[in-house]
Image (cartoon, helix red, strand yellow):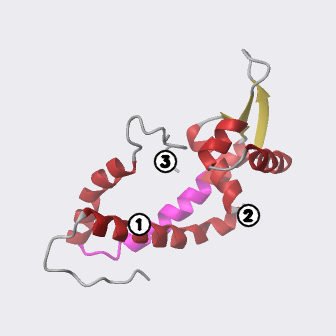
Amino acid sequence: MISRRPRSRQDPGPRDVADRLHSAAIHLLRRLRTADDATGLTAPKGSALSVLVFGGPATLGRLAQVEQVRPPTMTRLVAELERQGLVQRRPDPGDGRLVWIHPTESARRILLEGRARRVARLEDDLRQLRPAEFKRLARALDLLERVARPAPGSGETKAGGRA
């Protein structure tokens, strides 16, 4: 459960809001992640597949970069996903040195079903809010999505679109 911090007499500053938002995001994702148990995927496999399903095919190097792991780690992970029939390697038609990793239809189905379970669980939670609270939260989403986008020129990428 998210701890309730006492309200100060002053408006909270960016650090206070950042701290609370960080904590709330972690708690929310942990709760929703339990819905992913039904996929049978480990968190690293699910994360890599999410990049491919929602963001499109990627090279091993790009996938390793997005997932913030070393290329040998991603090579092993992709090999396991390939053995499970969840990804396919395809050579780049214009550059024989490049290989693209594509999700299979089975991977798409698993990820979309997992997302549907997480959304349904969150929807149930949102139904517990009072109408005014729900409206406030809905209005705040535009700001949250803007904060979540990578800053231009930061080198960060929005991996995977809507996961």
Q: What's the residue type where badge 3 is placed? A: Arg
- CA–CA distance between discs 1 and 3? 19 Å
Residue at coordinates 66% horizontally, 55% vertically from top-left? Answer: 46
Q: Is residue 127 magenta?
A: yes
Residue at coordinates 64% horizontally, 37% vertically from top-left? Answer: 62
Which residue matches tag 2?
Answer: 40
Which residue matches tag 3?
Answer: 162
Please tell me whether mark 1 sits on a helix, a strand or a loop: helix
Work out which quarter of the rendered image holds the N terminus and state it: bottom left
Question: Magenta region's main secondary structure?
Answer: helix
Question: Mark 3 or 2 closer to N-term?
Answer: 2
- CA–CA distance between discs 2 and 1? 27 Å
Q: What's the residue type where badge 2 is placed? A: Gly
Residue 35 on image: x %, y %: 59, 68
Please tell me whether mark 3 sits on a helix, a strand or a loop: loop
Question: Residue 25's image quarter?
Answer: bottom left
Residue at coordinates 86% horizontally, 48% vertically from top-left? Answer: 83
Q: Where does the magenta region start and end? A: 112-130
Q: What's the residue type where badge 1 is placed? A: His
Residue 80 on image: x %, y %: 82, 51
Question: Residue 117's image quarter?
Answer: bottom right
- CA–CA distance between discs 3 and 2? 21 Å
Which residue matches tag 1?
Answer: 22
Residue 107 on image: x %, y %: 70, 48
Near-viewer residue (126 or 41):
41
Residue 3 on image: x %, y %: 38, 83
